[in-house]
Image (cartoon, rainbow, N blue to C red):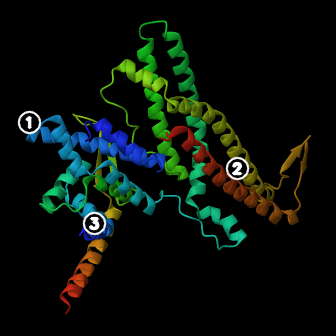
Amino acid sequence: MVDSSILTKKFQKEMNAGIASLVLLTVVDKSNKPMYGYQIARLLEEYSGDTSFMKQGALYPVLHSLENSGLLESKVEPSVSGPPRRYYEITAEGRETLVIWQGVWKQMKSFVDRAIKGG
Amino acid sequence: MIKSVEEYLELLKTELQDSDAATVQDALSDAEEHLRAALTSLREKQPEASEEEALTQVIDQYGSPEETASAYVEVERRTSPQLARPVANNESLLARFFGVYVDVRAWGSLLYMLIAFVTGIFYFTWAVTGLSLSVSFALFIFGLPFALLFFLSVRGLALLEGRLVESLLGVRMPRRPLFTQQNLKWIERLKELAIDRHTWFSILYMFIQFTLGTIYFVLFVTVLSFSLSFIAIPIVQEWSGMGAIYNNGIRYFFPIWSYPLLIVGGLILWTTFMNLARGVGQLHGRMAKSLLVIDS
């Protein structure tokens, strides 16, 4: 029993690795103004409902890596309460990439669905 | 049971002790930003929840220090800094020598060597003025607040220099300001900064940058003018009809057969310098990292 939950966790983590980038890029793209980390995390929480797919802390390194590859850009702005916040916005390159990624995801999704259904 | 955001950050720092110092700094700023924002919003929704309950709830969603640390390690392993792409090793020596023209890092280093001249002078002036005024104002009541402001400015400059080093030299540096405790009195803050190795290393870097910046600039200008002169000699001699060397009222001509040699020589000199600049840039980046980034 314990083993299967560990395996499930591992499976979830491996799946999340690619999907997190796609989801984050989509969320930032849909928003009409720059978003900071906590806002993004809250929005994802709404989408995921009761099941949590990944810890909020794991979103930030993905945001950094998207920024590093030039798909997102960010700026730091002071906040009324607490430390300054980093606001993320999608770049033109990010939008182009996102279209391709969403295509990949659709193909992948229908492939997996068909494999599970077995016909 | 974690009782405060500070405690969480300490634990996260311990978890990340084997990671790149720049990653640690990013992880700490992200966690602080998120946890404080989440706490504020939770308190608005559930004013009756105790501080500890609220924090437990927030951390449960954010992830334990171990979970957060492993997420950073995982992503860091997959991505390297923008410019640090490995150079293909299967090319011939000649291709690698001239390949320097398409290497972003070489151009970045060149630009950095020019900028270092300006930043070096500025850092030096700032450090000398700040240090000497801090010492002499110590006699007066406003001496200590002045020293605090100076130390804080050093931190800020270290971060800015880090951004410059990462974008031009491709060496991973912190992207976020260093985490500091929020609830300290200013005098404790000053004490903390004054005994922090990082503050003094940053000031040392500001002094070193002055010398290095000057050397870089002189080298850059000298090699550039020599290379350009070599390449220009044939053109100048043929167009103006005058010898390129003028000494004691006599003009000396370079013979026509030497023109190709001069042009090739000028190109090789400049290409060698570009290769050298790329190496110097990497060394400078490593030095900046060891002086400006805290090892936990």
Q: Residues within 10 Å of mark 3 (few under 14, many from 20)?
A: few
Is label 3 in a helix, a strand or a loop? helix
- Residue at 32 percent of width and 54 percent of height: B67
In the drawing, what numbered circle is on residue B47? 1
Horizontal arrangement in the rendering, residue B133 relative to residue B273 (left or right): left
- Residue at 27 percent of width and 80 percent of height: A108
Q: Residues within 10 Å of mark 2 (few under 14, many from 20)?
A: some
Is label 2 in a helix, a strand or a loop? helix
- Residue at 22 percent of width and 63 percent of height: A53
User: Furthest-bottom residue in view?
Assistant: A119
Is label 1 in a helix, a strand or a loop? loop
* Amino acid type for the residue under numbered disc 2: Leu
Q: Chain of mark 3?
A: A
What residue does disc 2 label? B224
* Amino acid type for the residue under numbered disc 3: Lys
Q: Chain of mark 1?
A: B
Q: Position of residue B189 (x, y in %)?
A: 39, 23
Whether the residues at callouts 3 and 2 have beta carbons within 8 Å, the answer is no
What residue does disc 3 label? A9
User: Which of the two discs, 2 and 1, sits closer to the camera?
Assistant: 1
